[in-house]
Amino acid sequence: MRSADRLKSCLLQFRVSPAGLHFSLPHGLLRALTLLIVSAAWIVIAANVEPALANPGGITNIFKPLSQPAQEIREISLLVIAICATIFLIVAGLLAYTIVRYRHRPGDEVSEPPQIYGSNQIELAWTVLPLLIVFVLILVTSRTIADIQNRKPGPGAVQATVVGHQWWWEIRYPELGIVTANELHVPAGTNSLPQPTFLKLESADVAHSFWVPQLAGKTDLIPNRQNLMWIEPTQPGTYLGNCAEYCGTQHARMLIRVIVQPPAEFERWVAEQKRAVTEDSSTQEGRKIFFANSCVNCHTIRGTSAQGMFGPDLTHLMSRETLASGATLNTPATLRAWVRDPQKLKVGCLMPNMQLVDEQVDQIVAYLQTLK
Ligand code: CUA
């Protein structure tokens, strides 16, 4: 057999496609069952996989909402799943019954069964019923969308602007005069005293999407456009999210952390972030190297001549839990590895390997560690 023929016969027996596995089995039922089992397994795995960084607050799961918009989305998801599951059970049940009940048996005559051409009642039923179901789904969905979109920020709402970059999140609090990156701090409310945070979403380059499943639905960040969303968390904790729109090679390492804090703790964080950096004379060498290299072209350290806008603001770098948009935890060792060669941790990111010698890396890291 020619190798091309062999390949063809292999492909005919076993194919893998994005929709699932397809086996060349005799019955549609077996194929449907395989697809069903694979899909179900996929959903179970996807719902239980821990995100890249372990989150002590639990997994990111749309079925465990802890903020108002996410709560509304969960309710409508359950309704839609219930309707679709009912339809699936009826259709799959009838299909299975028909295949088993009317399967070919030895001794069956080879004649055709009686053919029926058209039935007004049946055709009317399977046209009107789906129309009604779709209409109900449209109505409840639009009500939820309107509920979420029409919410206006009240006087006590926290306002933040999130700008998507390849591949990190710039976070600004214009009213508080704070700029940070990748970790959004917001105050927690209570059921009787909700504390909403309103986000303006923008992009510096390509389309991204802000998604923290337990807090709200996903909203895209589109170049030259401003989108709005809000969250209203009631439970303090760290909530993980991802960029949810493919935006380039490091899209998967564009993680978001939303740190929900009790109001007093949030106020303390705000005060800390507003503070100017305190110069530490013991790290003067590292400071000199930082300012002599092109670090300053991309990074801002408030109160110094470093006013670059392409990379994350480093004024309070050490107050952040992670580096490189959640790609790794912020520890002295990872910070060192990151400064040494960012491309090793996050290939394609805009920060180049500065080709510094070990001593210079140590000194820069010592300086960066004073940015608390
Ligand atoms: Cu940013 Cu995907």
Image: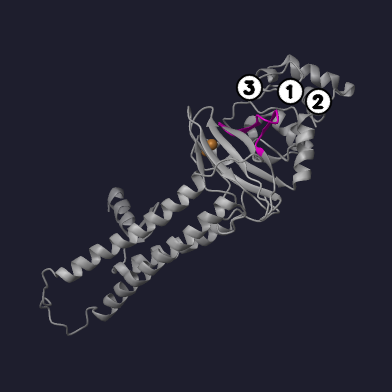
Q: Amino acid at mark 1?
A: Ile
Mark closest to the chain's N terminus, 1 or 2: 2
Please say if 347 is above or below 109: above
Q: Tag 3's secondary structure?
A: loop
Residue 336 covered by magenta stretch: no
Query: Looking at the image, which residue sits at the far right?
Result: 282
Sequence-wise, which precedes: disc 3 or disc 2? Answer: 2
Using the image, tell me which numbered label, if any, was put on residue 114. none
Within the image, what quadrant is residue 351 found in?
top right
Residue 249 picture location, percent across and down: 52, 35
Query: Is the CB–ligand 1 distance for label 1 below 8 Å?
Result: no
Badge 3 density bin: few <14, some 14–19, many ≥20, Cα 10 Å: few
Residue with the mark numbered 1: 301
Q: Which residues are magenta?
A: 164-183
Give the distance between the C-alpha atoms of the residues marked 1 and 2, in whole angstroms: 8 Å
Of residue 3 and residue 89, the one placed in the foreground of this image is 89
Instruction: State if disc 2 and disc 3 touch (CB < 8 Å).
Output: no
